[in-house]
Amino acid sequence: MLNKIKEINAEIAQFKIETKEQLEAFRLAFISKKGKVSTLFDDFKNVAVEEKKLVGQELNKLKTIAQERFDSLAEVLQSGSLSSVDSSLDLSLPPIPNELGSRHPITIVKERIIQIFERMGFNVSDGPEIEDDWHNFSALNFPENHPAREMQDTFFIEKNPDMILRTHTSNVQVRIMEQGKLPIRSIMPGRVYRNEAISARAHCMFHQVEGLYIDENVSFADLKDTIYHFVKELFGKDITVRFRPSFFPFTEPSAEIDISCLICKGSGCAICKQSGWVEIGGCGMVDPSVLENCKIDAKKYSGFAFGMGVERITNLKYQIKDLRLFTENDIRFLRQFTSAE
Ligand code: DAH
């Protein structure tokens, strides 16, 4: 009998009570009329007379222990402060620190670009990354089978060759022009994809920010002034801009935007390949036939567009030499970027 009492004592001590259901199970197991303690009392009559005194005392102790454990736990559960009964919980321990992440350099630069254009009155538009041929190419004057399409190694969707991963953010230009709400003054940041072997200088996925301004009487002077302002805001007042004649199927005239090399300030270094200039994007006056493709009256409206590589600009700003760093998620790299400047 004494052994039995010991056993039940241990059981009571180990019984886990964290919920009202477990408390009830405890009551049923030990305290109720059919519980283990009452059953022992029933058996007490069979105990030998000379042991009765000792066993009786132990039995009463057991009953009190069971009742007290029940009462104190019931009280704790009632007040909702269960943690105070969990002896493994040390409330004086300092909390596990919440590690703060840092923003990705591409995000920092993208947000800064957006901020500069928003202050000039541009809004931000978004478009699909999986695009049809019309919005990525045809509406932008890339004729079918024209070699210009090869400038951008396209990923095609196998099941539907009309669908591709967009090769540039210019698809969003088409989409907002098609909506027909004029004037348009919008920038379009996003991911683009090209079938390139991944190396320090090329990646199959990168980011662009597209810009589009359509209104009456928009001129190349407006385009130049917008880009001048943007470059000075982003890189600083002493950086100069040059427009180099170029070709894009969807703009006429077209230009490449170069800025004076941030590293050597124009005197020539490895980054600018000794030229003193680095390219940050392309631009031009929207070709009237692109406007017409999007049902905009090209006699009444004109506009400019530009597209810039976010990785390119980030590389220049932070002097990052390997594009792969952006997608490797190495926190030693990512931790270095904390602010927008
Ligand atoms: N879509 C071009 C590219 O990916 C960049 C570009 C050039 C965008 C001129 C434009 C533009 O809007 O006017 O290479």
Image (tube, rainbow, N blue to C red):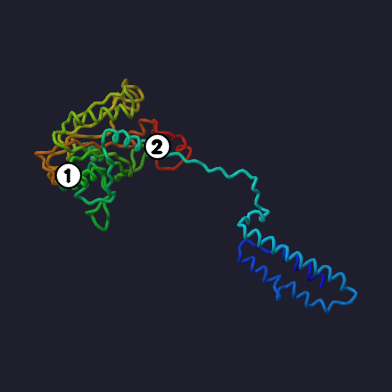
> What's the amino acid at mark 2?
Pro
What is the count of numbered marks? 2
Q: Position of residue 232 (x, y in %)?
A: 30, 26
| 317 left or right, relative to 184 | right
| 337 left or right, relative to 276 | right
* Residue indicated by mark 1: 142
Q: Residue furthest left?
A: 299
Which residue is rendered at x = 86% and y = 69% of the image?
A: 54
Out of 325 and 118, give the one closest to the viewer: 118
Above or below — where is 199 with respect to 91?
A: above
Q: Residue furthest bottom?
A: 46
Out of 165 and 225, give the one closest to the viewer: 225
Above or below — where is 198 with respect to 318?
A: below
Please tell me in which quarter of the rendered image ligand 1 is found.
top left
| 327 left or right, relative to 15 | left
Q: Secondary structure at mark 2?
A: helix
Above or below — where is 130 with respect to 66?
A: above
Which residue is rendered at x = 44% and y = 43% of the image?
A: 329
Q: Residue furthest right?
A: 50
* Residue indicated by mark 2: 105
Q: Residues within 10 Å of mark 2 (few under 14, many from 20)?
A: many
Q: Pointers 2 and 1 in contact (CB under 8 A)?
A: no
Indicate the quadrant containing the N terminus: top left, top right, bottom left or bottom right: bottom right
- Front label number (2 vs 1): 2
Residue 91 — which label? none
Instruction: Indicate the quadrant where residue 42 lies.
Output: bottom right
Q: Position of residue 190 (x, y in %)?
A: 31, 43
Q: Secondary structure at mark 1?
A: loop
